[in-house]
Image: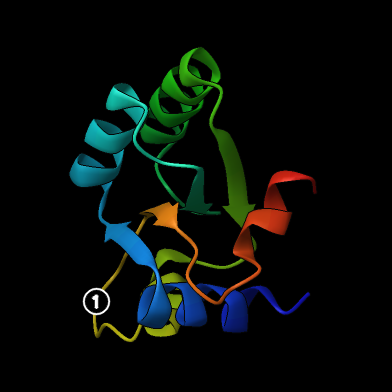
Amino acid sequence: MDVDKAISLAIKTGKVTLGTKKTLKQVKQGKTQLVIIAANCPKEIQEEVRYYGKLSAISVYTYQGTSWDLGSVCGRPHMIACIAVEQPGDSKILKLKEA
């Protein structure tokens, strides 16, 4: 699966939350299905997202690129460290849960 295409399609057709603070809020409330974090996301944030993800049974996928790369895939001109996918839309992004 092309992860970049799946992310951009999920953003266009589904319901996706961008940003660390909003993603953590979604994970703590159990309102998301999948979290994607950039490979260079600060360790403290990764640990916090994974901890709350485990409590809420939410899968966490590590994107194999920097936060600049992830921002670019999302169509934003800035860094994005975390993404919460609530609804995938036409994307097959939830297959990353099995990876």
**7 to 29, vertically: above or below:** below
Give the residue type at disc 1: His
Question: Which sits in the foreground, 7 or 47?
Answer: 7
Give the SS element for disc 1: loop
Q: Could you tell me residue 59's position as x and y percent?
A: 60, 36
- Residue at image location 22% in from the left, 33% down from the top: 25
In the image, is 37 to the left or to the right of 72? right
Please, which residue is most extreme toward the top here? 55
Q: Residues within 10 Å of mark 1 (few under 14, many from 20)?
A: few
Q: How is the image coloured?
A: rainbow
Give the residue drawn at x 47%, y 81%.
Answer: 8
**Where 23 sits versus 66, above or below?**
above
Q: Is residue 11 above or below residue 93?
A: below
**Residue with the mark numbered 1:** 78
Question: Residue 99: horizontal and vertical position, in percent?
Answer: 80, 49
**Horizontal and vertical percent position of residue 64:** 64, 63
Instruction: State whether residue 22 is above or below residue 9.
Output: above
Image position, residue 1 (x, y; %):
78, 74
Which residue is depicted at the point 53% across and 31% down? 58
Horizontal side of 94 relative to 73 (left or right) equals right
Query: Residue at image x 43%, y 57%?
Result: 87
